[in-house]
Amino acid sequence: MEAGIVGLPNVGKSTLFNALTQSKNAQSANYPFCTIEPNEGIVPVPDERLARICKYIPPQKTVPAILKLVDIAGIVKGASKGEGKGNAFLSHIREVDAILQVVRCFDDPNIIHVAGKVDPLSDIEVVEIELMLADMQTLDTALPKAERAAKSGDKEAIARAEVIRKCQAHLATDQPLRKLKLNPTEQKVISSFGLMSMKPILYVTNVDETDLEGKGPMVQQVRAFAEKVGAEVIPVCAKLEAEIAELEPADRQEMLNASGLTEPSLAGLARAAYRALGFQSYFTAGEKEVRAWTVPVGATAPQAAGVIHTDFEKGFIRVEVYGLDDLETHKNEKAIRAAGKLRVEGKAYVMQDGDICHFLFN
């Protein structure tokens, strides 16, 4: 699963990507489309629960959850019609599972805005409209084929045509598809189309160093908009984060303290992106390692076991589960078991965020 970093040109996408992945390879020139092919990187998801578990179960190594990020070139108005190499860039967005839209919320005469002025809501609108127009093209192309197949009485084709028309009607109201409620069957039918305005979105407001908490008027505009569409907003100063990422750990903490930050803003961004993708973590803990494993919210115990190894899911018998609170109260697993706090769950168990697990399998 991966998230794509998108936005208009010159809003700080590549700077943010480089800071997140601690990469120095991507270009950062002050002109549109300096990112042609998408750059990819793996980012650890900071989780303070790992350190809390390690306090009671000291391991040889600690392994956090990870997130794959893709830095996609800037989108401009008319991208759905091919403007600014738009078709190629939109195809990259089609491949990701969630969208992190970087929105410029700072003024700097030395950094040219593609529209000639800094207007975060206009930037959001440009990207949203282009994604919806591209989705409409996809659906318009797919409908005739689905209708032809439906004439034969094929139930799957009939269902596909119905969902396509439902999505078209929704887009005609100028609303992205993520606001359209589809049942699981409809979602499965439409999933192969890679509809972009259906993907979950997170707004990353790129602020200057005087507004690290995102209290300025431009960020507040984005917050108000995001609240209406049910999205989250994370303020980040990409320039500062890039500088912090290049420092040694001791110097990094000193710079964070001087900036009034308890941790890099990118840590909060990674966690927010993880949530936007619909992920949660469970843990395994032992002498060799304490590890965070990634599962979708709603995953069952066998599905969670399958993340470790497919054989675990196939031969799943049961899972022994306890919580971090139990560990901090009783100090070790033996005491947790003696206190009757170690739960034994079967195949129907739905995993909870933060579960600490031992899987038993055949």
Image: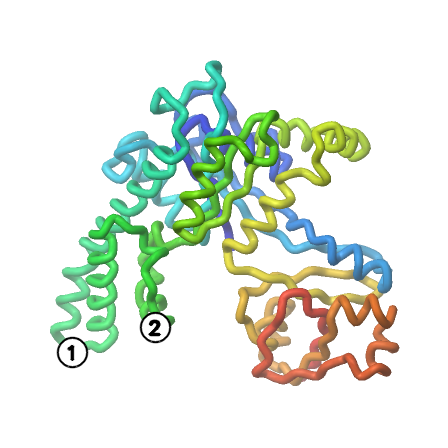
The residue closer to the viewer here, 123 or 295, is 123
Q: Disc 2 residue type?
A: Thr
Examine the rendered structure and indicate whether residue 106 appears above or below residue 219.
Answer: above
> Circle 1 — which element?
loop
Picture coordinates of residue 276 (x, y %)? 50, 54
Picture coordinates of residue 296 (x, y %)? 54, 65
Marks 1 and 2: which is nearer the front? 2
Which residue is located at x 60 percent, y 47 percent?
A: 270
Examine the rendered structure and indicate whether residue 86 appears above or below residue 300.
Answer: above
> Circle 2 — which element?
helix
Q: Which residue is mark 2?
A: 185
Is residue 38 in view from this perspective?
Answer: no
Picture coordinates of residue 234 (x, y %)? 54, 42
Mark before the other along the chain sequence, 1 or 2:
1
Which residue is located at x 26 percent, y 40 percent?
A: 80
The residue closer to the viewer here, 104 or 301, is 104
Q: Which residue is mark 1?
A: 153
Q: Disc 1 residue type?
A: Gly
Is residue 262 shown left or right of residue 272? right
Badge 2 crowding class, 10 Å Cα cut-off, few under 14, some 14 to 19, many 20 or more, is few
Estimate the spatial distance between the alpha carbons at disc 1 and disc 2, rounded to whole Å: 18 Å
Picture coordinates of residue 186 (x, y %)? 32, 69
Q: The C terminus is located in which quarter?
A: bottom right
Which residue is located at x 86 percent, y 72 percent?
A: 330
Which residue is located at x 70 percent, y 65 percent?
A: 283
